[in-house]
Image (cartoon, helix red, strand yellow):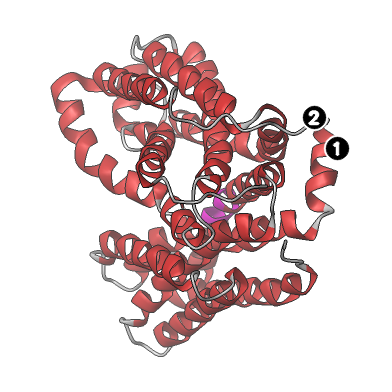
């Protein structure tokens, strides 16, 4: 496969914005749960299902999505997902009955999954080999940046026009992005692959280069949301809740910079060592190691996304690897908060740090084990 002669930074920026709007498919609901509770007169546990539906689709169909992208090509999938997402958001702006909103959110999970699986291979393809680590590390920031932006812009939107305006603006943004990208996205030849649920899983998880980024990424996703949620109150330092995710973004950028000189597995090892070292520092009563911990939280995902093009040469294999990341990432996010809640209930800060340390060590061991089976494409 011919590598890009120069990095198309303008298209990288537009695709990153697409990632922000994909993340907002989660965030536009998670940040307005109380408003949805009031409008639909349902208990918050029921309304919260509207958030988890998107994760459920990722767990069930993440690997299949990778196979679909490999078969159809990223351009078709991205444009189709943007169009579908726009239609769904604009339909949600009508504030339909709850059962219909449930269906729309389930379909929105398909749109979200298609975007987060199809965009990274395209971003890798339009970057030079030297710039690929930085480009993929930038992509790894999309959810954290979207959450920060959403926290700022959603409250005034809600004050101005409520749920209808929020959903309508999101849908309009997706439609505008589809229009902008239509003439810009490269029309790369898709690869003939059979798409079946079982075959897609066998193809991905039987190949070390394809499965490794996802199997390493899952340990990070188990940790991130849960630790952001439970660590600041456990340390009696609530201000950290807003600071630590920003520190992780610095880790993402550092992963990109290091990736120009180091292979992804070395950056992953450094990331998990930061997690382990930060945990030990917190255990002996210091606060500043929390920042080291979250530098590691940025290094690991940045390196995992950089590993996709580094360890897989074809667009199709890169799409499959991204599908595995999508599936396992949603598994980790779904598991992390419940198991950390149990750890905190049993042992407060000590319980949290014990589990954090154990998962970080497990992640490091997995990196060291999987790296032996990786064959870097010529």
Residue 28 within the magenta-colored segment of the rendering: no
Rendered position, 140 above or below 102: below
Residue in the foreground of this view, choosing between 90 and 193: 193
Could you tell me how far apart the alpha carbons at marks 1 and 2 are, in whole angstroms?
Answer: 7 Å
Rendered position, 48 above or below 42: below
Q: Main secondary structure of the magenta part?
A: helix
Rendered position, 244 above or below 182: below
User: Quarter-wise, where is residue 103 in the image?
Assistant: top right
Disc 2 marks which residue?
195
- Binning the other alpha carbons within 10 Å of mark 1 as few (below 14), some (14 to 19) or many (20 upward) gives some
Q: Are the residues at dot 1 and dot 2 in contact (C-beta closer than 8 Å)?
A: yes
Residue 166, image x, y percentages: 27, 24
> Callout 1: helix, strand or loop?
helix
> Callout 2: helix, strand or loop?
loop
Residue in the foreground of this view, choosing between 134 and 320: 134
User: Quarter-wise, where is residue 167 in the image?
Assistant: top left
What's drawn in magenta, residue-wise?
333-338
User: Quarter-wise, where is residue 218 in the image?
Assistant: bottom right
- Residue drawn at x 61%, y 76% is 358
Disc 1 marks which residue?
199
Residue 318, image x, y percentages: 66, 47
- Binning the other alpha carbons within 10 Å of mark 2 as few (below 14), some (14 to 19) or many (20 upward) gives some
Residue 227, image x, y percentages: 44, 63
How many callouts does the rendering have?
A: 2
């Amino acid at each position: 496969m011919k590598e890009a002669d120069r990095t198309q930074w303008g298209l990288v920026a537009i695709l990153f914005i697409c990632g922000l709007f994909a993340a907002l498919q989660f965030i536009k609901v998670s940040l307005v749960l109380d408003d949805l509770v009031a409008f639909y007169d349902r208990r918050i546990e029921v309304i919260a299902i509207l958030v988890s539906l998107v994760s459920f689709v990722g767990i069930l169909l993440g690997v299949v999505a990778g196979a679909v992208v490999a078969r159809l090509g990223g351009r078709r999938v991205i444009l189709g997902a943007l169009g579908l997402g726009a239609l769904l958001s604009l339909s949600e702006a009508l504030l339909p009955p709850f059962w219909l909103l449930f269906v729309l959110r389930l379909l929105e999970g398909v749109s979200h999954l298609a975007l987060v699986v199809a965009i990274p291979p395209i971003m890798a393809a339009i970057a030079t080999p030297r710039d690929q680590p930085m480009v993929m590390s930038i992509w790894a920031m999309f959810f954290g940046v979207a959450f920060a932006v959403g926290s700022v812009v959603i409250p005034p939107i809600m004050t101005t026009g409520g749920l209808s305006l929020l959903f309508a603006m999101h849908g309009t943004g997706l439609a505008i992005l589809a229009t902008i990208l239509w003439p810009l996205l490269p029309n790369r030849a898709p690869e003939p692959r059979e798409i079946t649920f079982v075959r897609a899983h066998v193809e991905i998880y039987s190949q070390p280069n394809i499965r490794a980024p996802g199997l390493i990424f899952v340990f990070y996703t188990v940790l991130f949301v849960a630790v952001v949620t439970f660590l600041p109150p456990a340390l009696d330092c609530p201000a950290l809740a807003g600071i630590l995710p920003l520190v992780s973004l610095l880790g993402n950028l550092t992963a990109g910079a290091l990736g120009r000189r180091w292979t992804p597995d070395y950056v992953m090892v450094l990331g998990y060592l930061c997690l382990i070292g930060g945990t030990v520092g917190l255990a002996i009563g210091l606060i500043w190691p929390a920042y080291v911990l979250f530098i590691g939280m940025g290094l690991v995902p940045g390196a995992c996304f950089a590993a996709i093009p580094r360890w897989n040469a074809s667009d199709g294999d890169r799409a499959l690897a991204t599908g595995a990341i999508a599936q396992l990432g949603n598994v980790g996010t779904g598991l992390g908060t419940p198991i950390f809640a149990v750890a905190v209930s049993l042992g407060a800060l000590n319980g949290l740090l014990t589990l954090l340390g154990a998962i970080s060590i497990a992640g490091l061991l997995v990196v060291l084990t999987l790296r032996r089976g990786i064959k870097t494409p010529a």
